[in-house]
Amino acid sequence: MKTEKHYDAVVIGAGAAGMAAACAVCERGLQVALVDREEHLGGILLQCIHNGFGLHHFKEELTGPEYAGRCIERVLSLPIDIYLETTVVDIAPEVESRTVHAYSGRHGVLEFHARAIVLAMGCRERNRGNIGIPGLRPSGILTAGLAQRLLNIDGYMPGKKVVIVGSGDIGLIMARRLTWTGARVRCVVEILPCPSGLTRNIVQCLQDFSIPLHLSHAVTRIRGTDRVEAVEISPLHNGVPRARKAFTVECDTLLLSVGLIPENELSRRAGIAISPDTNGAEVDHRLQTSVEGIFACGNVLHVHDLVDYVSEEAETCGGNVAAYIHHGRDTRATAPVEAGANLKYVLPNRCAPGETTRLLMRALAAHDRAKLVIQQQGAEVVRRALKHVRPAEMISCSLSERETAALRPDVPVQCTLET
Ligand SMILES: Cc1cc2nc3c(=O)[nH]c(=O)nc-3n(C[C@H](O)[C@H](O)[C@H](O)COP(=O)(O)OP(=O)(O)OC[C@H]3O[C@@H](n4cnc5c(N)ncnc54)[C@H](O)[C@@H]3O)c2cc1C
């Protein structure tokens, strides 16, 4: 039997993004449902027991569960209806009958009817299938986030002699965590010439424990039948493995930390336009997707480096959702924002003339002393000096009302990084 529920807004995902968005909508006097497939509120933060969270948002250094705890406290202080162990399986996006379909161990089959929907489903890890390492399929190969969950939540040690593929933050954090727990982390292997993770994590998680980092190297073979026994590692020359210089490292576990992908199956099913640069939804100046009344924030929109920015973005998104419900669609003409030289992407994909706008972007490569230049039809809007630029660290640039006042609608705004 199906139960129908009616809300002003339904928020899908109760991580940092979903919680902040739900609170922001509710605090504006609207009825909100917050839905998550897990047993607890908090999302990925609950398994991140290291510190380093909240320096911007709470002005103090917290662990993931502490950061989540503060957000949960706020959610529980508000009249938000929470649906846990409830998985959203489909979204019917039609404006007149916008519906979220969900199945729940606690609540049965649910159909939420809402005036607005917030996508806050986070992201998932790329796995072996995404990178195609040759070799057999022994046990002992798992993603770094899964290993983190096994260790920090379920209390299982994933292995004793570990090689980590990819120098993304999750892999780095796990190198330190496994070392503390008694495992021997043999090395981290990174295909790129520079690390993918934050500099502070390279120092605190690898250098402090003398864990070797092989840049411009790849794991070219996995050995072992029942369990991983060793991996073959090759240096790369112009991206091609040099077989003659390959070496073997014995290990019983291979952790993959090779990137995150926004969790957008539901978005695609709802017909939302997805950006090939972020793998997240394309959004306008209100963080509204290409489908009216459906908004997106957090890692489902683009993979963030810091949770503080997730909370900030989601807070803004919640405010926009409330404005949409109260006043309808913002139909002002806007200008498309484009990523130019040396930038992978810029968000949001549109900005409104005369409105304060925060642009978030990622560089394609590392540079020191770069200049961020934003212009429209050759007219410079902003030029900012950046001391260090790293692909792992998001670049944030706030444009004031005055700076956006002269922007012309429908004419592309170009963001480029001069190096
Ligand atoms: C290992 C690791 C280390 C990190 N370290 C730091 C750090 O030191 N400092 C820092 O600032 N940030 C760090 N971060 C980043 C930060 O934790 C994340 O960016 C942030 O928590 C993401 O929040 P989110 O709400 O977008 O996604 P999530 O927390 O992933 O939440 C998404 C939620 O959506 C739910 N969901 C998904 N699909 C459905 C569905 N169909 N139906 C119902 N529910 C669904 C999921 O269950 C989940 O609870 C780290 C992240 C990781 C993974």
Image (cartoon, helix red, strand yellow):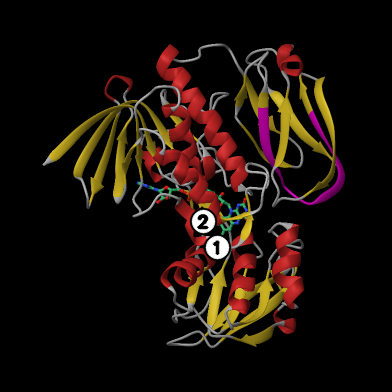
Mark 2 crowdedness (10 Å alpha carbons): few <14, some 14-19, many ≥20: many
Q: Identify whether 247 is placed above or below 25.
A: below
Indicate the amino acid at tag 2: Pro
Indicate the amino acid at tag 1: Ile
Residue 235, by quadrant, is bottom right
Q: Are marks 2 and 1 in contact (CB under 8 Å)?
A: yes
Q: Which range of residues does the magenta coloring cover?
A: 358-373
Residue 400, by quadrant, is top right
Residue occupying image coordinates x 73% and y 66%: 204
Residue 172 seen by the camera: yes
Residue 386, position in %: x, y? 84, 40
Q: Identify whether 96 is placed above or below 150.
A: above
Q: Is residue 20 magenta?
A: no
Please tell me which residue lies in front, 375 or 9: 9
Residue 41, position in %: x, y? 40, 49
Q: Which residue is mark 2?
A: 65
Q: Which quadrant: the N terminus?
A: top left
Q: Secondary structure at mark 2?
A: helix
Q: Describe residue 135's horizontal placement relative to residue 166 as left or right.
A: left
Residue occupying image coordinates x 49% and y 37%: 20
Q: Which residue is mark 1?
A: 49
Residue 176, by quadrant, is bottom right
